[in-house]
Image (spheres, rainbow, N blue to C red):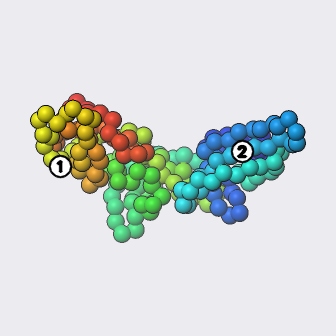
Amino acid sequence: MATTADFRNGMCLDIDGQYFFIIEFLHVKPGKGPAFVRTKLRNVATGRVLDKTWNSGVKVEEVRIERRPYQFLYKDEMGYNFMHPETFEQISIPGDSIEGVQFLKDGDMVEAMVHAESETVLTCELPAHVVLRVTYTEPGIKGDTATNALKPATLETGAEVRVPLFIQNDELIEIDTRDGSYIGRVKE
């Protein structure tokens, strides 16, 4: 059991049988009345964000989470299959539990949040930035660069992103996996 004084970003709580990560929190001590804690929580299962206010000193159920590295092997009808690089243990994770799954390619390393007691995988995160090859994009039109124009491009994983007009087929680009935005070109 933890109290509101123990809150920190990334902490996982069990609220009514559902798991929530603390995105942000704020201790408030008003001039009148008791202190309280205002939090933003993200539901692990649905990804929904909700605001919750707690009285100061309230006890909450903390969930012990371990972060473990896994390497992506392949995808099948069971989900996405990963292997732990040190123990060679293999696990299968459903696609909706993986953030940025459309940018996942064979051999990529991810970080899985695992419930310590039940050994179940809660979520799985890709690195913030990945380098991928452009497999197809329309050629840019010369003289069409007066504005900050973007065009669609298909990546080697099948994901489609918006890139600047000067990007050509078979180029390596860096992508932000959190929102799918173009960051820059990568030299080979």
Question: Which residue position holds label 1?
Answer: 136
Where residue 160 sits: x, y (%)? Answer: 28, 51
Is 123 in front, or is 65?
123
Question: Which residue position holds label 2?
Answer: 38
The secondary element bearing badge 2 is classed as strand
Inspect this view and state whether residue 74 appears.
yes
Which residue does the image show at 29% across and 47% down from the upper left? 161
The secondary element bearing badge 1 is classed as strand
Res 14 quadrant in image: bottom right
- 110 on left or right of 106: right
User: Looking at numbered disc 1 in the image, what kind of residue is underneath it?
Assistant: Tyr
Is 183 in front, or is 142?
142
Q: Which one is earlier in the sequence, the residue at label 2 or at label 1?
A: 2
User: Looking at numbered disc 2 in the image, what kind of residue is underneath it?
Assistant: Arg
Where residue 119 sits: x, y (%)? Answer: 58, 58
- Measure how far apart labels 2 and 1 are at the Cα level: 47 Å
Which residue does the image show at 39% across and 54% down from the upper left? 101
Farthest right residue?
A: 33
Q: Residue 73 carries which label?
A: none
- 171 on left or right of 176: left
